[in-house]
Image (spheres, coloured by chain):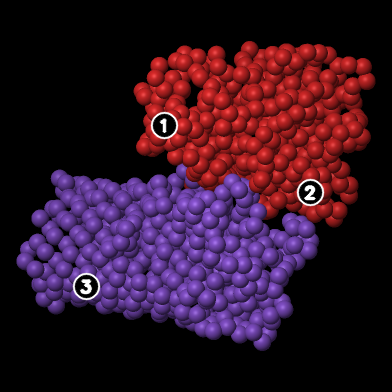
Amino acid sequence: MTAALLMGAMPAFAGPLDDPHVGSLGFSGPTTGDLTAVYWNPAALGMLQGNQFMFGASLRATHVTVDRASIDPTTGLPGGTSGFPSASGHGLEQPIAWPPGPGGFFGVGAGVARRFALAIATYTPFSQKLSFDLATPTHYHLVSVDSRQLALVSGLAIELTDSLQVGVAPGLLFSYGRLVFDEDTAPGNPSATGVGSPEATARYDLATAGTQAPSYFVVAGIHFRRAAWEVGLAYASAPLGSDGTVKLAMEHSQVMLPATATTDLCSSVGNRPCVFGEMSYHLPDLFTAGVTWHATSHLDAVGIVRWVRYGSYDQIKIRIVGPSGDGLLVSSVPSQLVLYRGFQDSWDTRARLVHAPLGWLRWSGTLRMETSAVPVANVNAAAVDGLKLEPGLAIEFKLGRHLRIETGYALTWMFPVTVGTSVFDPAAAAACVQAGYDLSVPACQTQRAGRARPTAAGSYKMLRHTVGLMTAVNF
Amino acid sequence: MRARSFTALSLFLALAGCSGAPMFEYDSLPIGMQRAPSEPGGPALGAILARVAVGSDTPLLVVDTGSPLSSLPRGTCPAPAAEPVAYAGNIQLLSAWDTRAPLRASFRGVTLFDLCAGAVGDATTQVAGVLGGDILHNFSLAFALPRALALPATMTIYSDLPASDSDLAANGYAVLRFNLRGSTAVSTASEGGLPGVPSSRVVMRACGNPPAFVPDGPVQTCRTGEVEMQAAGSNLLLALSTGHGPLVLRASAWQRLGGDTSAPLAGEPALYSPLVAEPIPAHWVTLSRLALVDGDSGDLWPGACAELARARRIEWTLVNQDSAACFQPCDVSGGVALPAAAYLDIGSELPAAIVSDTSDLIANLNGDFPSGAQVDGVIGTETLAGIPFEIDYVSQPQGRLVASCDPGADRQTCWAAPRCVGPTDGGPTHTCYGLHGHAPACPQ
């Protein structure tokens, strides 16, 4: 559940690439009665027997390929003769990093007096790391991103009746992020077409100074069981008290000035950090539902649906402040930017079979399908998404009465996305300049929305491998 | 039950849809502005003017941070009115620098007063309305007011200013925190019972006529307890108004500064203010120097001039530490130098209009706070020419004015001094004015 928030933070930097496997690659869900319930459905904590301690890690490797459509070099619009080389983006995420990397899970909890369960857990349910080559044709949308979200959540479950439990898990969300992209500083100049002209291109390298002051959110859920059936429902809020908005202070930022792309704005003050930025965006809330059917004593069938309300996530706003010598307005480069995202709600569904042929062994097979959070026209290197299929296998060993070890693997394959008509309009920037930045002119509305950028027409492919290892100790 | 729930939901949605929250649309790119004359017959370095869409017309509108309310008449002007009428309306702000008058910002559903604004700067510069602090205080506003008449003044609207005070200071900005004044319960023939206007008037502490300072000048001694005694100049409380050109002072403040005649002389032009309908008799003088100083009015605060003098002494010590300079006893606590306040030093020969203490302008400035510290006048835009600044209204817990000087500006014309943080604030040494300090405290 908490992942809803964290996945919401993710799009701020790239695509809706949340970690759908927090806690476990093949056994966790809204009806699972272990510590991962802090994430999936706090009510399921009520099934916790005795004390439990869980820790684990996963490794996630992502590969993105972008083949931009050729453009007309005079207009920047698709269909011309200027082609681009294929661009490859890579990201390897693992938990051993600082600020804490993705894929880690640590939790401890206990059932109390057979009516209550308490737990506390920390994990990084969302993260993304993706870097393109520096000279990539995607550089006006994304050069690289490194985003990590650390959640610290406490959970409480109460057993109302023998079959009904409720739970709540308030949490803190600590964010870290770095985003690098290029910006054309001379709208109307041919470089705006995406051909790439260092004379007019500034590079923005924006990063937080460690983790940020936390956002607050809450997850609440209900768990019901009768005979061979279990049902779990949960809701995770967007950050509270801020209308769902998260603001990140990007205090370790640089802006490489046009022409050289090597002289940064801070060279006049001794090259110490002198550019301060702020990034803001909306986070979605999320609903999760899960059903488990205990078909036999050895076989379970599980269905899970998540509704991620990405629709509120429309754009990222960035403002930078430079050194005093250049003025607050940072006159040589844009000081306020809008990066368009234009997301839509996505549905994540998965079906799973869990088989326990032996008392000390069980395995699961999961097939997950997730709809795209990014409409085709809005896809770009910073927001690559499409319909995804993901088969996964996991196996768990029980070693004695107290120890369980689980490992698993999942392969995420995105159906290739071909963007024919991109929402990004390279001609709008120049047209808006010609109109004197008149907000009543459609081109200026396009620019204001962050869509006056080089076209993102082309084809996009994404493949991801995830490997996980989890250990649970009951005592 | 279901029907009742549906009814309740419908009512909720209807109320939500009619909440009447203002809608703001802007792009955070500089908006080109015109300038009114700073005074009758003076250069066009005065009030900041945009254009506003009124039907097919595009009359001038003054952008005034000193006006606590916004106005735009719905009929022709002048129109007699017993009392102002408030209504929910729109301001479509157009660039006044571009002859095409493009739409540059839109403020919809805002509270406007059906008033005729009159003239600003001189009698010929008639404006149709005022974009006042009640709207502007929702933003962080950056202003660039060049001294050269050929260059446009610009205003840029931001949602906020992300950098912290310490980060801004480290990069050479003077950060001057301010409180807002000017709230009032407006008595109007309001349509729909609109509330009074919020506090939005930026009021700054200042030191008038301080002496010029050069960091390699002679030492200024200051023994313990003499911090206020060693201050030079006169403390002032001034409102920042982009609807005025010159510095405006009330007569009593001018006399505190050592001014001679404060009454208007025969033939002197009047002051045209957006805050007052009628021209204000004024005596025109020049002020040698003005320093805006960060600080508050707490009991322990020594005053703007004392803080300015302390900041200069500390800078002098750091500049001259190789010559065995030491921090003066009045600037030391516990053996280390106190923090020096940020300040913005503006010179020289600043045009100023002296008006009567009983003038409508001064009464307007103090109408919200008749028993408290009295505002002495107004800092106009001509005073701030060549000083890029940003008014960050939305900063919490206090708003802040963030200023720097144009590159290459002469120190005697403009000097933005960031807050100088001493060792007691956590650092091992001073890092102020680009200097690292290890200077000792002077013996008592």
Q: Earlier in the sequence, mark 2 or mark 1?
A: 2
What residue is shown at x 19% (from left), y 59% (from top)? Answer: A54
Query: Which residue, given by chain and number where applicable, does mark 3 sit on?
Result: A407
The nearer-to-camera label among 2 and 3 is 2
Q: Colour of chain B?
A: red
What residue is shown at x 17% (from left), y 56% (from top)? Answer: A53
Going by the numbered disc 3, the residue's amino acid type is: Thr
Categorize mark 1 by other alpha carbons within 10 Å: few (<14), some (14-19), many (20+): many
**Marks 2,3: beta carbons within 8 A:** no
Identify whether A7 is placed above or below B63.
Answer: below
Query: Which residue, given by chain and number where applicable, does mark 1 sit on?
Result: B439
| Residue sitting nearer the eye, A25 or B425 | B425
Q: Give how far across and how far down residue A130 sits, in percent.
A: 43, 70
The nearer-to-camera label among 1 and 3 is 1
**Marks 2,1: beta carbons within 8 A:** no
Pointer 2 indicates a residue of which chain? B
Q: Secondary structure at mark 3?
A: strand
Q: Give how far across and how far down residue B384 sits, in percent.
A: 71, 36
Q: Give how far across and how far down residue B124 sits, in percent.
A: 92, 34
Going by the numbered disc 2, the residue's amino acid type is: Leu
Pointer 1 indicates a residue of which chain? B
Which chain has been coloured purple in this picture? A
Q: Secondary structure at mark 1?
A: loop
Q: Which mark is residue B172?
A: none
Pointer 3 indicates a residue of which chain? A
Query: Which residue, given by chain and number where applicable, does mark 2 sit on?
Result: B151
What residue is shown at x 81% (from left), y 41% (from top)? Answer: B35
